[in-house]
Image (tube, grey):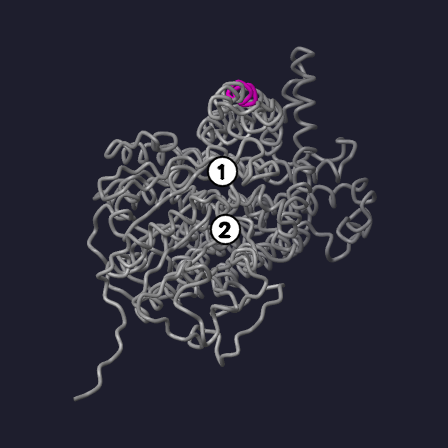
Amino acid sequence: MERAQERSPGPATDGSALRPAPAGAELELLVHGVGGTTPEKMLGDPRTVRVTGDDTAAIFRRAADAGECAAADGPRGEPVQEAYVWCNLTSGDGTRALWLLLLPFMVVNLAHWMRPAAHGRMRTVRLYGLLVRLAALTLTVLFTAAACEVALDLVAWQCAGVADCARRHTWLGFLSPAVAGDAWWTRPGRRLALAALIPAALTALLWYLSHRTWNTYESHQPMARDPEPETDTSALARPGFWYGRRLVARLRAAHTAAGLLTVAAAVATPTARFDHRPGGPAVLNALGWLLAAALLGCAAAVVAVVCRRGRSERCPDHRLDRHLVRRLPLGALVLLLLTLVHAGWSRPGWRSAGRLPGDAAFGALMLTQGLLVVVLAVVARGLYRRRPEPRAAGHGLGGPAVALLACALGGVMSGGVAQRVADWLDGTRSLLDGPPVLLTWQASVIPPLLVVLLFLAAHLARRTVRLARIQRDRVRHEHPGEPEDPARTRRIAHARAMATLTDRAPLVIGVLCAATLVLGAAALAGALATGEPPEGAARRTYDVVRAAAETSQALGSWLVGIGFLLFVTWGRRAYRDASARRTIGILWDVGTFWPRAAHPFAPPCYAERAVPDLTWRMATWTARTGGRLVLSGHSQGSVLAASAAWQLSPSTRKRVALLTYGSPLERLYGRWFPAHFGPPALAALHRDVACWRNLHRPTDPIGGPVRLPGDCGPEVDHEPLRDPLAYGRTPEHPLPAPVLGHSDYQADPAFARERARLLSRLRPELPTQRPQSPEP
């Protein structure tokens, strides 16, 4: 961590240097939220000591609480505080912004965890996971196919085969017969073999990134404990939930092999078309058939690996399927090399013309993805009917909707990049045939989709303005007798109205999915029916339709190019600038919170390190001291805190009180991930921990109430906190109090009051460490 801390004088930083706390010790373990912070801010002291952990994630104390004379209680009688700082798990140098390019992989991985809750329907649950994994596999094939389209078709086949295009781009001269003559690399098969190294290198890069993060994130073993009986407790309580090492390794091998096989197929298809013609080379034709059979056999093995049973969560699965993990990608690599050698063989009379046969491949991919999403929606709806939950997003269809968005995002990115590269290579649009027609149609749907989103944004803005007007009257009634400040009233009302936009996320996703489905179907139908890009298909129609088609096609490619640059630039800034990171932090941290159960090339799961860290700390501290512990989590930290509490043994959970504030546990996770954070799971957590209190504000756009009844004791939810703490100037607040929203919950007096109540409610009869009596 790039900050200076004092080091404890003890010989170790694993917690052993700390003096064992006396009986009755009290500890508050703080877990920060998105955006990260420093231990100095969390603990309110410039002098802090790292007591356990490393530069990636660690636990800190005040220096005064870590010395040999540290008391059982902190200053002013408060419990000793420890801060778990995990921000370096999700942030780092600017190169991590490139992870944003893997956004479709992360989104489809989210769909795996968004299934409805259905206790006892294991076969249906496995079918749901299988369909998501197959959809994720199609995204890897689509990503590699798009890279093949750019490198093989547009560059090596079309541009290098056209004299004027090759002369405009001198770096392609050695591949062009018109420029380099009859040189060795100018043969079409050899041009394809050379260009195939680019998508193959991209696949190797994805494998390397997944393998490196696999060694870093999925290598932390959870605490060993016995599994609990299957009840309404969340699956997050299973001992092996945060240890998906075996599944990620298996999926990584399958997706790497799928990417290499896609490159091999892109090279073998035009070669086979030339060899299969009447009078073609018989020996090369026979070898091509053998290669095609081998490619199909390896592809079947890839699908079989993906279709195997998913995660084993009842206990940590330490097996790694080493032979499969090594041999499947190696076999695909050998087949790719054989394909490149076969394509590079001399074939007199072979000339490149037109475009490579890619329309059928991309059309089949799009149809396969659509079919998988439809079947997934049927399965999800069946699970939802088993146990309906009114607040679940999309009434059980949240997972299929997100899977559809992942596929659409992958298609739009692929089509947009291909169209942008084609426009760059052929500025006049007269030299090259361009990318496959379907990719051009996919890029062309971006402008109408943005128009739909603009109308939706206008609707939400009008609704927010109306709600802010209503909130002004409520703010006036909440402060009777105080002189009114119209500007301050508007500011508070605006903050409350803006906070409600989070609850409109299902509407946004629903409209976006409906528009994506309609526009995607229209793009597929237009490509299949006309065989031409939008501007060509509209050439003989009305002038308005023709102008709209030409504008949409041109804008689509430019918008993808500009969006690509903005994507990387914004992501790079977000990893360096804390204020920018908070803007997208909640969405990104939700996406990387979940294990990689569907796509191994998704960004890594930080919770597979953070949850075991918290579990080990709480379990060892309570076992050593017998003291009382309050687990205090803010924002995303409350989700980590709840997940860590589930991982404790039942007896240890009864020693822990849970304090959450600004928590998205129900507002976000409960609605979108009902199988793991739905009402039954949160109610079970309420019963299992000693006590739980949740603080929230009406101005908080992220946190909200947990909405659990008080049948297991006092209610979990505190009444909404006042924000700001004072409307006008008061003796306690002589300066105007700020509207805090999602931040600084500790500034509210209710925070210390509720923490003290939690400590007092922890059962006093819990066994504590007692001094040993002298031997008789």
**In the foreground, 199 or 179:** 199
Say which element carries label 2: loop
Q: Nearer the viewer, residue 647 or 591?
A: 647
Asked where in the image residue 1 lies, by quadrant, the reply is: bottom right
The front one of 291 and 326 is 326
Q: Does the magenta stretch include residue 123?
A: no
Kind of residue at disc 1: Cys
The CA span between labels 2 and 1 is 14 Å
Q: Residues within 10 Å of mark 1 (few under 14, many from 20)?
A: many
Which image quarter: residue 484? Answer: top right
Q: Which circle, 2 or 1, is nearer the viewer?
A: 2
Residue 13, horizontal then vertical, whole percent: 48, 74
Q: Nearer the viewer, residue 461 or 559?
A: 461
Q: What are the residue bounds of the magenta stretch?
A: 460-467
Q: Is disc 2 in contact with disc 1, using a CB cutoff of under 8 Å?
A: no
234 lies left or right of 16: left
Residue 338 visible in the picture: no
Image mark for residue 602:
2
Relative image position of residue 719 (x, y in whole percent)? 38, 35
**Residue at far left of view:** 776
Tell me where residue 254 sits by quadrant. bottom left
Tell me the residue at 79%/45% (across/down): 166
Residue type for callout 2: Ala
Give the labeled residue for mark 1. Answer: 407
Answer above or below: position of 328 versus 8.
above
